[in-house]
Image: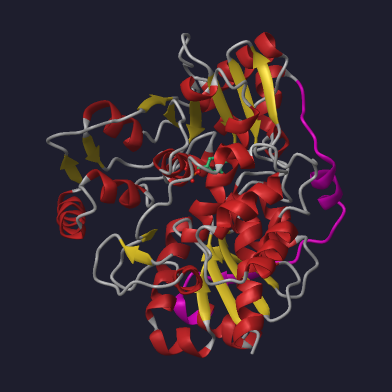
Amino acid sequence: MIYVSTRGQTPALGFSDAVAMGLAPDGGLFLPESLPDLSGRLASWEKLRYAELCFEFMREFATDIPAETLRVIVEKSYTAFSQAEIAPLKQLGSRVHVLELFHGPTLAFKDFALQLLGNLYEHQCQERRETINVLGATSGDTGAAAIHGLLGKPGTAIFILYPDGRVSPLQERQMTCTGAENVFALAVDGTFDDAQTALKEVFGDQEFRRRHRLSAVNSINLARVLAQCVYYLYAWFRLPAAQREFAEFVVPTGNFGNVLAGWLLQRMGVPIGGFKIATNQNDILYRLFATGEYRVGAVTPSLAPSMDIQVASNFERFLYFQVGRDPAKVRAILEQFKRTGDYRFAEWDRGTFSASRCSDAEIPGIIQRVYREFGYVVDPHTACAFKDLSPDRVSVVLATASPAKFPETIASAIGVVPTHPSLEALKSRPIVKHRIPATPAAIRAFIDQHAVA
Ligand SMILES: *Cc1c(COP(=O)(O)O)cnc(C)c1O
């Protein structure tokens, strides 16, 4: 299997190179040159354990990794999950199921992809006899999940920048209480955008980048999207057979990464009924699917902070298919969008997507309602997905984070403080963080000092 860039100006690459590169040099995102048809495999995959299913699925894509090696990488990636089922599907009502994606080490769905990505990086280090230094900026969940994907792995170091005092105390503890020697949590003086800007400049320094074999951790890595396809398939198999083709997956979305994975799986011949894109008050995707207009708005911080985005980076992959896989059209649309912050699709085919948006004012009430109706506690991101479930179809709501990560919001909504043993354990461990200014010079100096050689 080979991988092409959505912007069409990068030579096709194998799986391992596309994963190592992350973003294509032409600024585009990698996609398989053609999607496999899985419809003939489904019957034989139905009963597989989660990690077995993931192996069979990834085998279609990671064709440059020997099968037995890939099996070990995949199996290892799901050992840090606290539930044997990995992604348990729970039935809440006759038409409502919830897919719990928060049983990984950092209690959010990003562990599904970043545990696997960490092991793929480790494998590459061993293969190429090289070390790797991973660098990223985070406003919360991604940094914690990336850190836990690389924790203690020989030959790797990870540097995560975050705005000091602006991530939740529990998220900070997940990044700073690991005790691992290859993890560096960098608390920058400034906002997330300041960190992001400084980081872009560091990556722009090609000599520095090569010298430290610097790799970016972000939401657009090909391996992340593919790893996320697997839980849709796993859940689909666990639905009653008569419901599968009609089920709508309801997905709390910010960067379009999570829902894109489900949609790709549908294109691979898995008959999923449809998808609902559930945004918070930062609703660019809601407006797009409602009207066909993609227009930037200002980001307002919300109770569901991991969905506070302005431009959905993974949308480019969907756009590529939407314009008939024509990279020239992708470039033209993105060019206009970049110039004006606005693009209106003349013929917008929303396909099997629907959309909902949820304001901060609504989130506590939804947490209350779900608790009353089903005796089930949802986190603020998952609450957005419960905004308005279609009454006449079967819904599978993706629960993207554990409510225990957001104790204040939950407590004020229902008077119950959710806890989780892994978060409680963190509270007695020392915080190790490095305060630095949000400047490229300070970041470079820190990496020069601490990178794995
Ligand atoms: C990252 C995140 C999301 C949004 O995921 P996208 O891939 O950006 O769509 C939703 N919920 C939680 C808890 C997250 O951490």
Image quarter where the C terminus lies is bottom right
- Determine the residue positioned at 50% across, 60% down: 61
Residue 140 showing in the rendered view: no
Give the side of residue 328 with respect to residue 298, left or right: left
Tell me if residue 10 is in the magenta stretch.
Answer: no
Give the side of residue 174 with respect to residue 200, left or right: right
Tell me if residue 426 is in the magenta stretch.
Answer: yes
- Determine the residue positioned at 69% across, 64% down: 73
176 vs 336: above or below: below
- Determine the residue positioned at 58% across, 21% down: 364
Given residues 51 and 387, the one toward you in this image is 51
393 vs 17: above or below: above
- Determine the residue positioned at 49% across, 28% down: 250
355 vs 311: above or below: above
Q: Position of residue 57 (x, y in %)?
A: 57, 52
Given residues 11 and 368, the one toward you in this image is 11
Quadrant of the rendered image containing residue 49 = top right
Q: How is the image coloured?
A: secondary structure
Given residues 149 and 56, the one toward you in this image is 56
Q: Position of residue 171 (x, y in %)?
A: 67, 50
Image quarter where the N terminus lies is bottom left
Give the side of residue 251 with respect to residue 326, left or right: right
Residue 229 showing in the rendered view: yes
